[in-house]
């Protein structure tokens, strides 16, 4: 542990937080679109949004411009801070186990490190993802703070509630980088890892 480089963990977390600020309104509208029209929860039965831009403007109009960032941004930042910190840090640390020099990296090593770091980070950060999605979905209906919501989910659903959806979330994280590189759409470049 004394040889562990903490820079990738710190930079990964900071980069993820900055990215979340830029993409949060899009993620918010995506979540609202995904949960609308469901019959399980009466709060989401109504089809309110016709598409992403309609949802964006309707949320802005009905809940105010701050609704695009307020309330739900805290769990989103927590999710990105934990997920990004773990993923980038583990990815860089794993690569150093396999190679000493950048020139010695191979596509296979990068893919293995990407898959392993994606699965570990998404699994560990899943409770923050569950919280973020639930708070986004509820929007102005949401009452209470982030910590209280964690406690409520745990008390009502137990540990299973905090890790709901962990398998598909981990699978998604595992295949994203590998698919982009292996499909030939992108080479093993900085841009591919950025995407």
Image: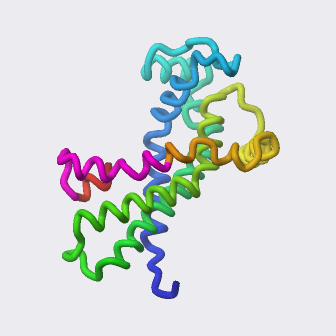
**Where does the image place residue 37, in percent across and percent down from the top left?**
58, 15
**Which residue appears at 49% of the width and 53% of the height?**
17
The residue segment tinted magenta is: 170-188
Left or right, residue 31 beside residue 176:
right
**Where does the image place residue 90, in percent across and percent down from the top left?**
45, 68
Task: Specify whether residue 176 is painted magenta.
Answer: yes
**Where does the image place residue 195, in percent across and percent down from the top left?**
32, 48
- Residue 87, compared with residue 136, is above or below; it is below
Residue 13 visible in the displayed image: no
Left or right, residue 87 beside residue 81:
left
**Which residue appears at 59% of the width and 50% of the height?**
126
Query: Seen from this angle, which residue lies furthest right?
Result: 155
Task: Specify whether residue 191 is painted magenta.
Answer: no
The image quadrant that residue 68 belongs to is top right
The image quadrant that residue 11 belongs to is bottom left
- Residue 123, compared with residue 48, is above or below; it is below
**Where does the image place residue 150, in percent across and percent down from the top left?**
73, 47
Q: Main secondary structure of the magenta part?
A: helix
Say which of 11 and 184 sits in front.
184
Left or right, residue 13 beside residue 130:
left
**Which residue appears at 65% of the width and 35% of the height?**
135
How many discs mark residues in the rendered view? 0
Residue 172 visible in the displayed image: yes
Q: How is the image coloured?
A: rainbow
**Which residue appears at 29% of the width and 82% of the height?**
100
- Residue 41, compared with residue 128, is above or below; it is above
Query: Seen from this angle, which residue lies furthest bottom?
Result: 2
Say which of 145 and 33 sits in front.
33
Say which of 175 and 56 sits in front.
175
């Amino acid at each position: 542990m004394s040889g562990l480089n903490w820079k990738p963990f710190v930079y990964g977390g900071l980069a993820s937080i900055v990215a979340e600020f830029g993409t949060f309104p899009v993620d918010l509208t995506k979540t609202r679109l995904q949960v609308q029209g469901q019959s399980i929860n009466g709060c989401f039965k109504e089809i309110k949004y016709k598409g992403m831009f309609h949802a964006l403007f309707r949320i802005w109009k009905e809940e105010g411009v701050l609704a695009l960032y307020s309330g739900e941004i805290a769990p989103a930042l927590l999710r990105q801070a934990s997920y990004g910190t773990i993923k980038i840090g583990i990815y860089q640390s794993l690569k150093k186990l396999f190679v000493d020099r950048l020139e010695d990296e191979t596509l296979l090593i990068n893919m293995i490190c990407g898959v392993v770091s994606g699965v570990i980070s998404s699994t560990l950060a899943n409770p923050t993802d569950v919280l973020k999605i639930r708070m986004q979905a509820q929007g102005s209906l949401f009452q209470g703070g982030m910590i209280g919501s964690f406690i409520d989910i745990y008390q009502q659903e137990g540990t299973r509630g905090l890790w709901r959806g962990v398998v598909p979330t981990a699978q998604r994280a595992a295949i994203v980088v590998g698919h982009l590189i292996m499909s030939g759409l992108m080479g093993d470049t900085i841009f591919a890892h950025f995407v």
